[in-house]
Amino acid sequence: MTVVDESVVSGSSSRRVFVGQVVGCLGWMTLAGASPAWAQQVFGPRYGRVVRDEPWGRLEEVADGIWALISTPLVDHPDARRTLCNGGIIAGTSGVLVVEGFGSDAGAEWMAEQAEVLTGKRPTHVVVTHYHGDHCNGLYGYGTDADAPKRMSTQATRQLLVERSRVPEERRVLPSGVISIRNDGRIDLGGRQVRVTPAAGHTSSDVVLRVDDPAVVFCGDLVWNGMFPNYVDAIPPVLDDAVKAIGADDGVVYVPGHGTLADASAMRRYQELLLHVGDAARRAIESGTPIEEAAARYRLPESVADWVLFSPTYFRVAFQAWERVLAG
Ligand SMILES: [Zn+2]
């Protein structure tokens, strides 16, 4: 386990940044600029053909007409935080959907440009998986003209943005399209359907996007890979069920909200981690061990022992989320 924290990084290039405006999934993310080894450990593995490689992330072609953005905010570069979260581009014959609004206008602008370069079409749809700032703060960057893409979220996510977004008014764009399960959550891009399934667990409203042939799942922050998830808004038992429902099937490409692409075995390791955290928290509560103490003693299971923590507080945040459920 590696704690990516300022206190263990020497050198002036390390810095602490609040991924703010609304509370972000990365929360207090510390950029370990002095140690590219960590960035290499977390973001090194590549699965698809890399078609763009930038300081803030890379686009990997995961299937014909489908690209995943793997954001790499740990690298030491002034633009490293342009996109912040993972996302993607899904192309059909009549439409192009971009997954996520990203952490900045420049990040969303860049993704819209990439969509046009790769598919010949401007994005027609944008779907945000949940309300956190690293996924939504850049929504304005898709433009406000008549030909701007339709920005979509669940009603609950839209409401959370109304209540909690701290993006300045003049550049705050809320999703106008509501994802509902009435039409089975399908978005038709022409010869390609995207199923958008409402879920919860990372927040009170998340969505999962699926393309069936070939099978690619955009998991939002219900899934993290290579780094311990942020439970700041989590409802842990609901999260565990949502992750179980996402599955761990051979031949499926899973795009996590943060970290590199996951396959079936990575998904199984992640499911085990979530259960491991839940068991440890439950034992602490049953034995009357103070939650802070139990979190301080917690160690990752062997199968994910090389995962990093963005903040040393993340175990405590996870245990407190379990405590809210079990003791509440
Ligand atoms: Zn996130």
Image (spheres, rainbow, N blue to C red):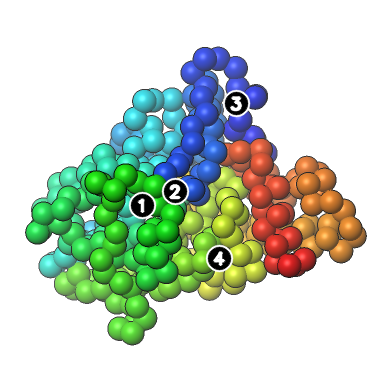
Q: Secondary structure at mark 1?
A: helix
What amino acid type should be assigned to the residue bearing mark 3?
A: Glu
Q: Which residue is mark 3?
A: 6
Q: Residue furthest top?
A: 11
Query: How far is mark 1 from mark 3, CA to CA?
Result: 26 Å
Mark 2 in CB contact with mark 1 (< 8 angstroms)? yes
Q: Secondary structure at mark 4?
A: loop
Rendered view: 317 above or below 240: above
Q: Residue at x 46, y 40 (%)?
A: 19
Q: Is tag 1's residue or tag 3's residue first in the polypeptide sequence?
A: 3
* Some atom of ligand 1 lies within 8 Å of the CB belonging to the residue at label 2: no
What amino acid type should be assigned to the residue bearing mark 4?
A: Gly
Q: Residue 52 location, x and y as percent? A: 27, 40
Q: Is tag 2's residue or tag 3's residue first in the polypeptide sequence?
A: 3
Q: Residues within 10 Å of mark 1 (few under 14, many from 20)?
A: many
Query: Residue 136, which numbered label?
Result: 1
Q: Residue 166 location, x and y as percent? A: 39, 47
Q: Quadrant of the C terminus?
A: bottom right
Q: Which residue is mark 2?
A: 22
Mark 2 vs mark 1: give the one in front: 2
Query: How far is mark 4 from mark 3, CA to CA?
Result: 29 Å
Mark 2 vs mark 3: give the one in front: 2
Query: How far is mark 2 from mark 3, CA to CA?
Result: 22 Å
Q: Is tag 4's residue or tag 3's residue first in the polypeptide sequence?
A: 3
Q: Is tag 1's residue or tag 4's residue first in the polypeptide sequence?
A: 1
